[in-house]
Amino acid sequence: MGRPSGVEVVTVTETRTGTYEVVVIGGGAAGLSAALVLGRSRRRTLVVDAGEPRNTPAAHTQGYLSRDGMSPAEFLALGREEIARYGVDLVRDRAVDVTKSEGEDFAVALAGGETVRARRIVVATGLKDELPAVPGVAERFGRDVIHCPYCHGWEVRDQAFGVLATTPMSVHQALIVSQWSKDVTLFLHTVAESELTDDDLRRLAAAGVSVVPGEVAELVVDDDRLTAVRLTDGATHRREALFVAPRAIPQTSLLEKLGAELQETPFGAYPVVDPTGLTTVPGVWAVGNAMGFAEQVVNAASAGYRAGATINGELLMSDLDAAVRV
């Protein structure tokens, strides 16, 4: 038995062929968690990892019990070591196409030119964050420009917060972050004052959030620290941390190619899934940010675990039923 030629497998414990029981597309928390469960279940599993985790800009992973404060890179490195213990293969490549073969098998085409086959597919391709086009935002993202108070709020607590409004939903973000600081300014930026409802204004006032109309021109940075937000009219407001709401771009192209049903949400179109992550395509699961916007690292890992256990049970019953028929 030989491994498919030309595939760079990073973690290998025994020889594999080009056919797996499960191929996991995506090597983040969700994908690695699914692979860990499947490996421990003695399933021939391959992880295809393009190496583009969503949380790369963040210095630390927060809110994950027993891993609070660990860097995302270290977290993923440990995950890769763990799946290797159970014979899971990992290839540094990108899945560019998935097709359903005759029977229940799938063919996964890789950018490197190889094709691997699997009985089941786990899509853990996540999403991409498109940041507001304000000078300084992209450069500071993950440092003092942040998006999630549950991920980063504690680290910037009691500082002077700014919230960059890009939709009326930014009001909700401003209200939430007021839990971590009593000095919060909502910069309306591209949101007109008329778009704020009376309830919005009452709640903002009750939370002590200041509202500043006008478009933001740039961030002011001194000594590698955010110090202020400057408007197009030249007015400058001292701020130490800025919360933004990136536009989420779901990475669902592979699911669409397979014909998975998508549903529109306020954060983009995501696959319709059951509680285990099973899509409307039999044999295909979506986990982590590939199935929803709000999946944090701990949620993504949980979803991967659930999908992995479900897939193992389904494969077992499928094989037993086939044996009974024979």
Image (cartoon, grey):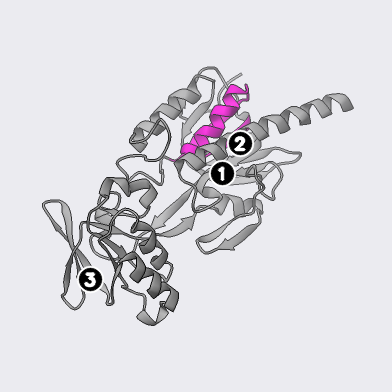
**What residue is shown with label 1?**
287
The quadrant where residue 326 appears: top right
Q: Residue at x 52, y 26 (%)?
A: 89
Determine the residue located farthest toward the right in the rendered image: 325
Q: Nearer the viewer, residue 199 or 153?
A: 199
Q: Residue at x 36, y 39 (%)?
A: 61
Where 80 sits versus 304, above or below? above
For the residues labelled 2 and 1, the Cα–Cα distance comes to 9 Å
Q: Is 220 colored magenta in this rendering?
A: no
Distance from disc 3 to disc 2, alpha carbons, whole Å, reads 45 Å
Disc 3 designates what residue? 217
**Type of the residue with mark 3:** Ala
Q: Position of residue 16 (x, y in %)?
A: 58, 22
> Residue 283, how many percent across, how many down?
69, 41
The magenta span reads 21-50
Q: Amino acid at mark 2?
A: Arg
Residue that extends furthest to the bottom in the rendered view of this protein? 194
Question: Could you say which disc has been placed on residue 247 in the image?
Answer: none
The image shows residue 134 at horizontal and vertical percentages of 27, 65
Q: Is residue 26 visible?
A: no
Disc 2 secondary structure class: helix
Mark nearer the N terminus (1 vs 3): 3
Q: CA distance from mark 1 to mark 3?
A: 38 Å
- Cβ atoms under marks 2 and 1 closer than 8 Å: yes
Marks 3, 2: nearer the viewer: 2
